[in-house]
Image: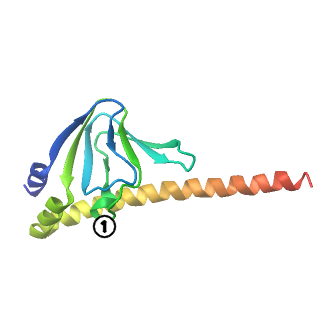
Amino acid sequence: MDMIRITRLARLHTFKAGEVIGRESSAGDEICAIVSGHVKVLLQLPDGGTEHVATLNPGESFGEALLVGKRQRMASAVAEDPVEIFVWKNADLLGHFTDFPEVGYIVMKNLAKIQTERVSFLLKEVRQFAEGKKEMKKVLSSFS
């Protein structure tokens, strides 16, 4: 029953393919869950370009960092195809969690799991980068 109440707090938004859902570094105060379609996650590069770092699928969420205090988006989210998302305002969710702490616990536990998976992926990428850097040093030292 409590999860039904949480769903009622959401607003359904639709986006066309290529439409920006949220832009990196812009202010935000909401969390989103994908109902249908796919969302590209893009990082802004120092040279002005972007890097496609992930594609999110139905059932996945984004904007979680905004729920726990971050006030600027860490990446851009762009509809890869027509997308429907549920959007919750942080204040609405946090108020619901105060009234129904067991629901807050379930949601925060799931968000912690998502964040742990994402950090694990990033650590793997950093390790691969570091290994590649070591190999490059070996190659370059062979020329001296």
Q: Please, is residue 97 above or below residue 39 in the view?
A: below
Which quadrant: the C terminus?
Answer: bottom right
Rendered image quadrant of residue 134: bottom right
Front residue (pair 117, 27) = 27
- In the figure, residue 83 lies in which quadrant? top left
Q: Position of residue 7 (x, y in %)?
A: 13, 49
- Residue drawn at 42 percent across, 56 percent down: 117
Q: Residue at x 29, y 39 (%)?
A: 58
Q: Badge 1 local density, few (<14 within 10 Å), some, or many (20+)?
A: few
Residue under label 1:
69
In-image side of 52 versus 38 (left or right): right
Outermost residue toward the right?
Answer: 144
Residue 136 placed where, x, y %? 77, 52
Question: Which image quadrant: the N terminus?
Answer: bottom left
Q: Amino acid at mark 1?
A: Gly
Between 121 and 65, the one nearer to me in the picture: 65
Near-viewer residue (126 or 14): 14
